[in-house]
Image (cartoon, rainbow, N blue to C red):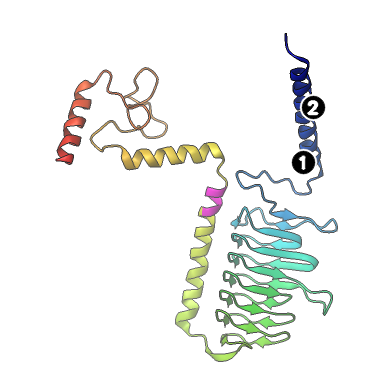
Amino acid sequence: MTSLGARVVLAASNAARKMGQSLDSLGKSMEVVKNAERLVPSTRFVAVDGITPSVSPNTAFVAPNASVIGDVTVGKDASVWYGATVRGDVHKVVIGDNTSVGDRAVIHVAKIQGDFPSIIGNNVTIGPGAIVHAATLKDSCVVAASAQVLDGAVVESNSVVAAGAVVTPGTVVAAGQYWAGNPAKMVRKVSEEELELMASNSLDTLELARMHAYECDKDLEQLTKDEAAYEDATTRDPEYFQPSPDGQKDEGDVLGQGSPGLIFDSVLTNPEEGLKLNKKKAAQKD
């Protein structure tokens, strides 16, 4: 006979569980952008005043812990990397095709002390920790790591803002120029070799972004399988039983358990294989 106290605890736990499920369902119904997070429970896309970020279905990658907020448009093959924040809460942000926003970079807009959106063209590289605040970046320019481009400034095409440089409000960086310092000043022209390197880096970043998108889209089950396969590949003796390629019947299957190996490490019907492996291990120790 169950005691009264035990019955009370059981009833309370059931009620708490049902309440939690109800709250979870309510939260899902209130989501503006339906987004199934795999492993990182962060919110990538947030609406502001009913305006939802517009992200191209062909966008290369938006990191699980990046934040894209409000009136933001992200173009094809663009990437927003880990910890980056793109905040279009009081004005709009436009990010062009094949543009990358580096780790921890911040893109914001202005409405209080001026009225400036942030407009970023195609093939632009924004480095890690950089700040673009209510500014315009034309096509194929680079804002290097920790640089700042501030309110109303314009960086023209094929130009470079060096790492740590600060482009002050209202400044125009002319096309093909290299600016550095705080406040930033023109240092020299961008060379043809640098322009080729910028274009190459942009393509390399796109390829890397697609790889990260593929990996971040995996669920826990797939990650567990990948980890087991990696451990198997690095520990299985090359002269021992080997896994069959995907889609092929496993000819070494034993009792429906698969080939002997990392997890199912038994020779069963092939004891000579186990003897050979043990002799090899003993020789290696000697």
Q: Residue furthest top?
A: 1
Q: Nearer the viewer, residue 283 or 72?
A: 283
The answer to whether residue 19 is magenta is no
Q: Which residue is mark 1?
A: 28
| Location of residue 193 in the rendering, given as x and y in whole percent from the top left corner | 44, 81
Residue range of the region highlighted in magenta in the rendering: 212-216
Task: Tell me which residue sits at (62%, 70%) in the image.
Answer: 122
Quadrant showing the C terminus = top left
| Location of residue 19 in the rendering, given as x and y in whole percent from the top left corner | 80, 32
Q: Nearer the viewer, residue 4 or 223?
A: 4
Q: Which residue is mark 2?
A: 15
Left or right: residue 201 versus residue 152 is left
Seen in the picture, residue 38 relative to 3 is either above or below; the reply is below
Q: CA distance from mark 2 to mark 1?
A: 20 Å
| Location of residue 56 in the rendering, given as x and y in whole percent from the top left corner | 67, 56
Seen in the picture, residue 183 relative to 222 is either above or below; the reply is below
Q: Kindly state the secondary structure of the residue where label 1 is placed.
A: helix
Task: Tell me which residue sits at (51%, 38%) in the image.
Answer: 222
**Magenta part mainly helix, strand or loop?**
helix
